[in-house]
Each structure stands twice: as structure tokens, then as C-alpha cells.
Image: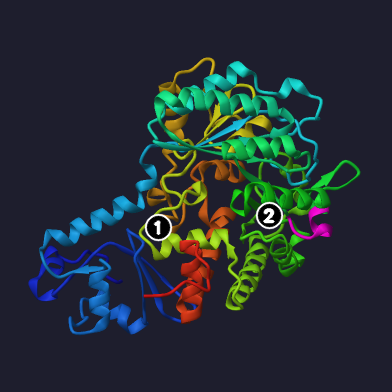
Amino acid sequence: MASTSFKSREYYSSADRRYSLLPFRFKKRNNGNYLLVNEVGEFQMLSSSEFNAYIRHELLPSTPEYQLLKAKHFLTDGSSSAHFELLASKYRTKKSFLEGFTKLHIFVTTLRCNQSCPYCQVSRQNESANAFDMTEEMLHCSIDLMLAGPAPSVTMEFQGGEPLLNFDLLQEAINYTKQKNSTVGKHIEYVVCTNLSILDDRHLDYFKEHGILISTSLDGPEHVHDKNRPMGKGGSHSVVTRNIQRAQEALGKHAISSLMTTTRTSLKYPREIVDEYLRLDLGSIFVRDLNPFGFAVKTQSALSYPSQDFLHFYKDVLSYVISINRQGRTFSEAFTTMLLTKILTPWPVGFVDLQSPSGAGIGVVVYNYDGDVYASDESRMLAEMGQRPFRLGNVLEDSYSDIFFGDTMQMIASAASNESLAGCSDCAYQTYCGADPVRHYSTQGDIFGHRPTSGYCAKNMGAIGLVFDLLDNMDTDLERIFWSWINREDVNRMRLP
């Protein structure tokens, strides 16, 4: 029987071992090489022989691998505190998204909507159902809570339903916020999430006057978009694309962004979907999978697909987008850009789905039309399905402290850090990924989740693995393209040092 005893303390502290290993996680790749990632997101590829020499303390200081691993904080061969101070500084930078606490504040001003999208995450209501509008009192209390937070910069996002159906309240929100903020002094960015179907000049004039950005949905060419996002007895593609162009002319191309949701229909048309974004001169595309919330749960059998099918689609889109950039046109894929930012730079990203601790409640909060406060948009959608474990409180009944530091937030926090979650704590991709207790509760009935059967885990691991495949075989042209996405620069003007 093999010995299971631990090696002695002297084995690890002996002076003749030359260097000490610093914390890292690793993954053996399909080509036989090893990917090493440390606590601050530095990574290094090693061959099998190099990896074995490294972990056996047999690397020679004269080798390039030794110097790279030392520079990237995978080993230390001295007692200098500066080495660890630099490592601590990098770790603080990676977690700097936590500074200021909640930065994204979502206001659901109405549940009324004029579309009937089969994948909709929200339990929408008819256009005439005014009982599902937020009252002015609830709006003011919600804004007061937002301004009471410590973050010096926040994003105020209006959702629905269709928020333009309650445009008067949206105007009241902007006016009240600016009045109150004159004594608070926060930097506030305003975003309206709209399907653009009822956009008119009155809206555009107001958006331009107050610097309001637009976020909309475009699922691709007409035959795809209209199947995914019907309106009345017809489709919405013609009116949406027309109003995207109107908004670009009135507000500037930078002021409008769009994302697409991938359904089973979408999987057949990766190039056609990208071509539609190019036709409308949208600077990027965000390839998003189906979320298991709200009305979308009822239509899953007709629209959903295995994670591997989505990853094949994502790979096809990304390959086509890269080829477009190689031809000299700057056009990025947003999810890939965020992963590249986390992998290649010391900076975090604002996308709450890729944050640990999880963005739920910590990075984002939702003020519902009825005054209830939720830890995320997905939490609110679960509540519309009759499940309310992530309700933080109510703006008319609870204080800031009760809402943001109460029992519900403590429960979320217990499963919010992937550093301590089973299946995540030893994953090589942990630093680049996030934690999603709300999604795991919805799909697996447990806030901690089960990684081997988690769709969230399968999607993120597949996407991160694909990005590393590209990085591992990257030529100078692709490196230039990736850095242009990260820096939001023209791919033709991007110059590598």
C-alpha cells in the first residue's frame, strides 16, 4: 500500500531547494502544455517537462522560464518584501471594482411592454396595465437610496417592460436626481434600456439634452430578429433598425449600444447576425446566451440548446469578427473583450457576471416598480415567478443599512466568492471568472451550485478556454487586434510597443 503520509517540514524549507512556489492553479491543455494562473491573473504556459521541473524545484535560474515565473510571481527566491508588496498591489487592483460598493442602480419604472419576445426574462404586462408603473414616491425613495451609497460614480439604468411607455416618470427621475445630486456631487451616467419601437423626436431631444445613453436589442437580420422579438402580429426589425440609425444621427454612434440574445434559431446564422451589426455601423456585438429566468423558462423547450452548441456559435462569431478586423475594420465582440481585459491587464471589468465577489447586491441593485429592492435583475425576475429569496427590502419600509447589510445580503455573500466555492477554488480560470448564486439557485436550487452540471460554469470555462487557444497561437496581427479592443482604438492605428 502506498504511503499517504505528508513530507516533513524540512522538505519544504530546505535552503538547497533554491526557490519557493507561490500560490497558483493550473490546467493541462489539449496540446499537452500546462497553463498556470496565479492569484492576480498572471499566466504562463509551460511544456510538460518545464512544469515538472518547476514544481520539483529543479528549474535553473539561468533559464528563461525561471525568470518569467519569477517576474510573474509564480516563485520567489529571496526574502525581499518588495516582491510581496507588488503582488499585494496587483491583487488590490484586480479587486478594485469593490471600491465604492454598488455602482449600477437599475430602476424598473414599469412592467408594461408592447412586445412579446418568447425569451423575455421579465413577466411583462400589457401596455394599458398602469397598475404596474412605479409611483413617484417610490421613485424618489429609490433615488435617495442610490445617492446615499458611498460610490462617487454610479450608473442609473432604466428598464422595464418598456421604460419609454412611462416616459414622464423617466423625466421626473432625471430631474429629481440632478436636483438632489447638486449637493451630493456624484458622477452619474444615465442609460435607457429600450426596444426603440416607440422612439420619437421628443425622446431623442431629451436624451441629447441630458446626455442619456441608449441600450437596445438587435438579434440579427430580419428573419432572425422578428422570430425572436415579435411585435403585435408582425415583427419589430424594420422599426428597430430605423430607430437605431435615427438615434445614431441625433446622439452620435457612441451613444447607442446593442446586444443580441442567442436562441436556437440564432445558432444557424453567426455570420448573418454579425453582418447586420456591421450594416448598421454598430461598433461591437455582445453574444449573450439565454438566461433561465422569467417568461423564458416557459419557452425553454422551444428555444434552449446545450452549452456546447452555444460555444460552437460563439467560436464561429468570434472567428468571423477576427477576420473582419484582419481586413482593417474595427469591430469587437464585447464578452471576449472583457475576458481579454481580465487576462492581459491588471484591471477588473464592470460586468457583474464576471466578478468575484459576485455583483449581486454588491455591484448592482434593482428598484422594482412596486418598491421592492432586489440584488440583481435576475433576482427580480425570480420574484416575478413567485420566488423571492433575493428580495433585499422595500424602499418605503427599510433603511439603507437594512437593505444592503441585512440577512438576505449576508446569505448572498456566503456564496459570492468563487475563491471559496467547491469546483472554483482550484480552477485555473477562477481569477477570470465570477460567481452567480442567483443563477445557480434558479437552475440548481442551491446558491452554491454544482460545477459539473452548471451551465454558467460550462459557458464561461468554454469561452475562457477558447480565448487562451487564441492567445497560445497568436500572431502579431491578432495581438494588435486584441489590444485595439481592450483600448477601444482603431485597429489600423493600434501600435504595439
At a point 58% along the width and 68% down the height, the residue shown is 330
Residue 392 percent across, percent down from the top left: 51, 27
Quadrant assignment, res 101:
top left
Residue 355 percent across, percent down from the top left: 45, 49
Task: Name which residue type carries label 1.
Answer: Thr
- Say if the magenta span includes residue 394: no
Pointer 2 or 1: first along the chain:
2
Q: Which residue is mark 2?
A: 260
Q: Counting other residues with Cα less than 10 Å from the Cα at mark 1, is it few (<14), some (14-19), or many (20 or more)?
A: many
**Residue range corresponding to the magenta coloring:** 219-226
Q: In front: 254, or 295?
A: 254
Q: Which mark is residue 431?
A: 1
Label 2 secondary element: strand
Left/right of residue 228 with respect to residue 191 in the rendered view? right
Say how the picture is coloured: rainbow
Magenta segment main secondary structure: helix
Quadrant assignment, res 232:
top right
Label 1 secondary element: helix
Left/right of residue 370 with respect to residue 222 in the rendered view? left
Inspect this view and state whether residue 473 appears: no
Image depth: mark 2 or mark 1 in front: 2
